[in-house]
Amino acid sequence: MTQDAWKRMSEWPLSIAAVVFLIAYAWSVIADVHEGVLYDVLETVMWIVWGLFVIDYVMNLSLARPRWRWFYRHIPELLVVVLPFLRPLRLLRLVALVSVLQRTAGTALRGRVMLYVACSASIVILVGGLAVLDAEQNVPTANIHNFWDALWWAFVTITTVGYGDYTPVTHTGRLIALGLMISGIALLGVVTASLASWFVERAQSAEAKEQQITRSQISALTEQVMALREELAAFEHAREQN
């Protein structure tokens, strides 16, 4: 089996597993579950999903050619697998669902880019909000104690607005904030580049249209000149015969 074949085969199962992980993680964080049967069930589900991601990483590493280059370029995936603390970041595998949505969104490169940006931003905001709520909600000095406040904080952070009405006080929360700010800058860069390419394409299209009109006019004038030359030649020929 090749690595591409494995990726095609595992794409949907891992995406579904990521959604299940998201539901279980969100449930445990929003409900603030730390003990009991429900806690055990949710933890078991998250560990099973984490195990599936471990299998996926091992399969990709074993099938990759060249293997060292793949390993070097996928260090973040290794960290997510080795450190269960980072497993919420693995929810970014939900972006794989975008490949299916893209088939119905057209084949234009800009359409794909904007779709990826929108889906990625939504996922990062949701996961960032859950993660900061998990880190902050049981800290007495924190001011982020419910999901909606956490979601609002994640949104204003990733958009680089940063009102300051909600701020993380824990080291984990601040680390999450740093990741969101970097993600926001990157996403804004992608949006800006897409808009710039749209303006450039519009300008090039208008210029190409004008050039086409000019060429058509030159072609029409050339035909008229040729016709006049033929008429003049015929007139001269008729005059010589007379």
Image (cartoon, rainbow, N blue to C red):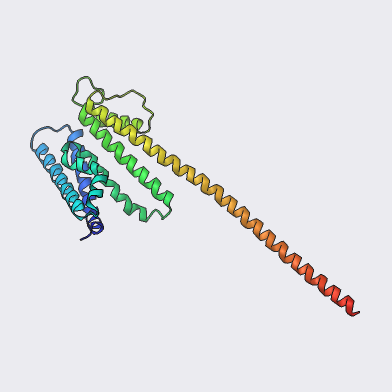
Residue at image coords 55%, 50%:
204
Quadrant position of the C terminus in the picture: bottom right
How many numbered badges does the structure rendering display? 0
User: Is 8 on the left-hand or right-hand side of 219?
Assistant: left
Q: Quadrant of residue 139?
A: top left
Question: Residue 163, how many percent across, how many down?
Answer: 36, 25
Question: Residue 203, how many percent across, how many down?
Answer: 56, 47
Quadrant position of the N terminus in the picture: bottom left
Using the rendered image of the protein, determine whether residue 148 is visible from the camera's viewpoint: no
The vertical placement of 223 against 193, above or below, is below
Question: Residue 76, how many percent across, how many down?
Answer: 24, 41
Using the rendered image of the protein, determine whether residue 190 is visible from the camera's viewpoint: yes
The vertical placement of 49 against 135, above or below, is below
Q: Quadrant of residue 140?
A: top left
Residue at image coords 18%, 53%:
62
User: Is 89 on the left-hand or right-hand side of 215?
Assistant: left
Question: Residue 29, how many percent across, how many down?
Answer: 19, 34
Q: Quadrant of residue 103?
A: bottom left
Residue at image coords 25%, 32%:
147
Q: Residue furthest top?
A: 141
The vertical placement of 233 against 45, above or below, is below
Q: Residue furthest bottom?
A: 241
Q: Judge by depth and name the residue closer to the eye, 110 or 66.
A: 66
Q: Residue furthest left?
A: 36
Q: Residue furthest right?
A: 242
Residue at image coords 66%, 56%:
214
